[in-house]
Image (tube, rainbow, N blue to C red):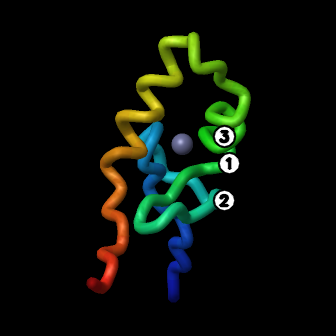
Amino acid sequence: MKQYDSYEQCGICEEKKATGIHLYTMFICTDCEYNMIHTEPREDKYNYYLQKLKNINQPKLYS
Ligand SMILES: [Zn+2]
């Protein structure tokens, strides 16, 4: 019996979710994506998301 585990760990809320987007190497679930879009820079949450996004390993540029 095969198990199909398509769940990925969200880089923001760190929960396993089935749907979301990939931003570079980070998976962001649809809930967090929605929350991020609807968070104002003056809100505390905004800084939290920014810190999380800084953890993304961005692809190195060839020089
Ligand atoms: Zn999430």
Q: Which residue is mark 1?
A: 30
Reply above or below: 18 against 54.
below
Pick the residue in front: 56 or 5: 56
Q: CA distance from mark 1 to mark 3?
A: 4 Å
Reply above or below: 57 against 16.
below
Q: Amino acid at mark 3?
A: Asp
The total number of labels drawn is: 3
Reply above or below: 23 against 4.
above
- Residue 22 position within the rendered picture, expressed as x and y whole percent measured from the top left: 55, 64
Q: Amino acid at mark 1?
A: Thr
Which corner quadrant of the figure contains ligand 1? Answer: top right
Instruction: Give SS at disc 3.
Output: helix
- Residue 56 position within the rendered picture, expressed as x and y whole percent measured from the top left: 36, 56
Q: CA distance from mark 3 to mark 2?
A: 9 Å
Q: Residues within 10 Å of mark 2 (few under 14, many from 20)?
A: some
Name the residue furthest front: 63
Query: Which callout, 3 or 2, points at the residue further toward the start of the chain?
Result: 2
* Pointer 3 residue Cβ closer than 8 Å to ligand 1: yes
Q: Residue at x 60, y 50 (%)?
A: 29
Q: Residue at x 45, y 41 (%)?
A: 12
| Contact between labelled residues 3 and 1, with CB atoms less than 8 Å apart | yes
Q: Amino acid at mark 2?
A: Thr
| Contact between labelled residues 1 and 2, with CB atoms less than 8 Å apart | yes
Q: CA distance from mark 2 to mark 1?
A: 6 Å
Horizontally, residue 19 falls left or right of residue 54, namely right
Q: Residues within 10 Å of mark 1 (few under 14, many from 20)?
A: some
Instruction: Give SS at disc 2.
Output: loop
Q: Which mark is residue 19?
A: 2
Query: Which callout, 2 or 1, points at the residue further toward the start of the chain?
Result: 2
Pick the residue in front: 41 or 25: 41
Q: Which residue is mark 3?
A: 31
